[in-house]
Amino acid sequence: MTEAPWRIETDPDPAACTDLLAAAFAREPAVTWICSGSASARTHWFRATLHTHAGLAGARRTALADADGRLLAAAVLTPPGATPTAGARALWAARTLLRSGPQALGRTLRYLGATEGGAPAGSWTLEFIGVRPALTGRGAGRALLDHALSALPAGAGVHLTTADPSNVPLYHHFGFTTLNETRLGPLTVTAMARNPSPRR
């Protein structure tokens, strides 16, 4: 029996996830629009965002890692009803403004404003899932998404938004349905949801 080329890592270091996701989202339409294609702005944006997310009660980070512990893919999920405190939001905004610039801050707030309130009641939110670019197309993303979804509490629904139309068929494969599409600047943002799985 062949050993899997990766292993699941729960609660990976946010800094390691930052580097991986900044690389994975280099060409993703929403992050490119928010950060104007700047690698530095993108890295700092993910750093501020994941730092804030790590402070949420019940927040989850899951990753695939190789035998040496290097992260190959990462997923970030938020539990139902979890939101940053006013102080955490202010700190995120200050860090984003300082390191990624006013445009990144403004466009993030526009994206959040256009998409908030769309999650079905009681659903988890899949914030990000990304694969190290050299591994794209080798099944790492599918393996991680399958694990992340199966590890959620029984009966949990999941919500996400994506501005990459190529992601929509992948999420359909995992049981997500399209809720709506929203135009935001050059983006078409698709909101999707996966109904709660039946209890075993």
Image (cartoon, helix red, strand yellow):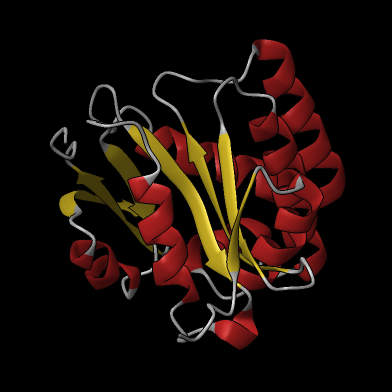
* Residue 134 drawn above or below residue 43: below
Task: Please report the residue visible at 64 percent of the width from the left and 33 percent of the height from the top.
Answer: 53
Task: Please report the residue visible at 26 percent of the width from the left and 66 percent of the height from the top.
Answer: 168
Query: In terms of depth relative to the viewer, which is nearer, 152 or 179?
Result: 152
Query: In terms of depth relative to the viewer, which is nearer, 164 or 172?
Result: 172
* Residue 94 drawn above or below residue 57: below
Query: In terms of depth relative to the viewer, which is nearer, 115 or 186?
Result: 115
Residue 98 visible in the picture: yes
On the rendered structure, is 96 left or right of 194?
Answer: right
Q: Quadrant where the N terminus lies?
A: bottom left
Task: Please report the residue visible at 61 percent of the width from the left and 71 percent of the height from the top.
Answer: 24
Q: Where residue 190 appears, x then y in whole percent?
A: 28, 55
- Name the image quarter holding residue 93: top right
On the rendered structure, is 92 left or right of 10?
Answer: right
Residue 101 visible in the picture: no
Q: Where residue 49 appears, x then y in whole percent?
A: 68, 41
On the rendered structure, is 197 left or right of 4?
Answer: left
Q: Quadrant where the C terminus lies?
A: top left
- Name the image quarter holding residue 34: bottom right
* Residue 168 drawn above or below residue 112: below
- Name the image quarter holding residue 135: bottom right
Q: Where residue 132 appears, x then y in whole percent?
A: 63, 75
Q: Where residue 39 appears, x then y in whole percent?
A: 77, 69
Extreme residue in the front direction: 1
Extreme residue in the top direction: 86
Task: Please report the residue visible at 75 percent of the width from the left and 36 percent of the height from the top.
Answer: 51
So how many labels did they put on this image?
0
On the rendered structure, is 173 left or right of 6?
Answer: left
